[in-house]
Amino acid sequence: MEELFFLQPEVVSALVKGFCVSVKLIVPSAIFGFIIGIIVGALMIYGNAFTKKIVDGYVLIFRGFPLVVQLFIWYFGLPYIGIYLSPFVAAVLGFSLCSGAYQSEYVRGAFLSVKTGQTMAAQALGFSKIKMVFFITLPQAFRRALPGCGNEIIYLIKYSSLAYMITCIELTGEGKIIASDSFRYTETFMVIGAIYLLMTSVTAWLLHRLEYRLQLPGFEQYS
Amino acid sequence: MMESLIILYGALPYLLRGSLVTIAVVVGAMLLGLVVGICIAAGQVYGGKWLRRIIGVYIWFFRGVPLLVLLFLFYFGLCSLLNINLSAFTVSIIVLGLITSAYQSQIFRGAIMSLPEGQLKAAHALGMSDRKAVMLIVLPQALRLSIPGWSNEYSIVLKDSAVTYALGVAEIMARAHFVASRTYEQLPMYFAAGIIFLILTYLGTKGLRILENKVKIPGYSS
Amino acid sequence: MADKTPILRIENMTKRYGDKEVLKDASLSINKGELKVLIGPSGGGKSTFLQCINFLVKPDRGRLWLDGREIIRARKKEIYGYRQKVGMIFQDFNLFDHLTALRNVRIALVRVKGMNKDEAQDRAIRELDRVGLKSYMHQYPAELSGGQKQRVSIARALAMDPEIMLLDEPTSALDPELISEVLDVIRDVRSDGMTMIMSTHQIGFASEMADEFVFLEDGFIVETGPPEKILYKAQYARTREFCSKITELYGNSF
């Protein structure tokens, strides 16, 4: 009986429910974060003085404020000006904007790492600016950005647990409930930790595979 | 608007006292991470196969499990399981310290590996034992090279320290939330907390940059 | 003649990297006050041999005696003590980059030999003075020229009062105009009676100073003998071939 605790239907279903909420938090946040990262990263390089200022301010705030503070601002702070978000929406918003700020740095670095000779050659061949970005710059930059951006996704998986603090009950939240109901704190958080470990490890492995797939001679990452 | 500013102004000393708690947690965690991180890095570079494997598991664990889960595990779980009575403050330092040790070890490891092999050879040639060679020759150089990475790690630990609010540590975030829920000035209060973190990040990284210049080896460009 | 028991004796030293033997059964013995010069093509095993003598590279096989006492490689303490008596000069200097010239010389005196700080300081300054760098003692390695670095490294080795010194191509990383300052120091140390094993391509300098040449090729000691013999009347064709090339290249003005 004792050792079967984590196989009891209620416990399993609570864990599965929490896991699903976590995944629902992580996947959209990762996608939005990546999109924001690309846009902001591109603006950092190709934008005019004004957009650059705005983008710099965004990165400063969203990288400088702790994620907990950001989440509190979205969930507890916005009602102050009459905007009410559900815990889930506030969490996805918070994760996406924070992740995007970090992603943008990698995207920017990747764009800068594409040598000027590459763009010159593309222009000499008659590429338009848009085509050049799509066919020459992006494919190269993407490979450079991948390790850093992938790391951000791993961070996102771990930081998704902070949604619990704004009452969005995901994996950690379900764990907290199970633990306080059963007083099995150690085992519960061990199991929860193991699930996160599994998520981060599988994701890391998949990202590694992707990197390997996309690898070109001369683009080897020195990590 | 005016009213908010007055409330904010009144709450500021209370928030700033919280920043002392934050600083204490962060400094404690960074120092613990430094000591453990150095040992791990040395073990990873110079240790045998089994030691390296154990260290690999340690790093994998502490880099793969969320901070919040570890805080709960240590504070609610392990502490009562092992029947030790630690305050939330102490547990926070330990957990943050262990996590950052896993990251810091990779900074030190990179720095150690970047040193030319000849440094260690010359130390051995003078009759130094492995331990002395590492303590006197390798570490003083590797630590200098690690300062930029360490500074980066500091800003991460600083921000992560806000999570210790979940255990009830009376740091900046906890105090901001306390004031916010009494005064209903949520937005200004959380924003103020964010700004304090921003300032602490700036001061810490600035201080480390000064340290980096101070201990820079003349003529050595990196 | 002085006492004839060899100060250092090496027997059948062998080193393998993977399945490549880079040193094959090398044996050598050297008496007090002698200078033996290792010559031979690059990659022929000179550097490996010297590093094996100091156990910086672990030989796969071979025995070694200092002052008639065998050094057992498995005993770490013994190795540390042995290395204190064997000075080593590296091709690329290997000064400790984070220490000034003075502290480079001093550190092992204090931390390895356990000398007190003041005494070590005096000794270090004396050694730096001997190599003509007393006025540079507060400079860091990155602030010194290659020749100066190598002279500091010689001072660092000398300060340990070694019984024998190993010099691994001490001048080959130097710009030509800096070579002579280092050779002058080596000559000076030699004339004080230091026992040395040195590998070098400076054939002129070596044949003027050496008691014996040891020709190494493919990890194998092909031939040993006095400089004139090896250079002009070598027994083996391989030695003759190498020596004619090298005298052509560096001249035979000695």
Image (tube, rainbow, N blue to C red):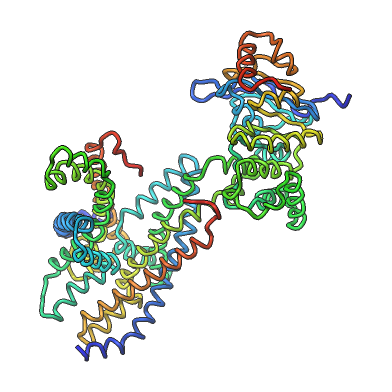
Q: Quadrant of residue A126?
A: top left
Residue C200 in view: yes
Whole-percent x, y for residue A11 in the image: 19, 59
Q: Is residue A183 left or right of residue B140?
A: left
Q: Tell me the residue at 69%/41% (across/down).
A: C154
Whole-percent x, y for residue C148 in the image: 65, 44
Q: Is residue C128 left or right of residue A39?
A: right
Whole-percent x, y for residue B137 in the image: 58, 49
Residue B41 vertical position relative to residue B69 in the rendered view, above or below: above
Q: Is residue B139 left or right of residue C122?
A: left
Q: Tell me the residue at 48%/44% (across/down).
A: B45
Residue A196 in view: no
Quadrant of the snapshot with the C terminus of chain C = top right
Q: Tell me the residue at 31%/56% (across/down).
A: B65
Q: Is residue C99 left or right of residue C197?
A: left
Residue B46 vertical position relative to residue C20 in the rendered view, above or below: below
How many marks do you count on the picture?
Answer: 0
Pick whichever, B94 or A147, lies toward us. A147
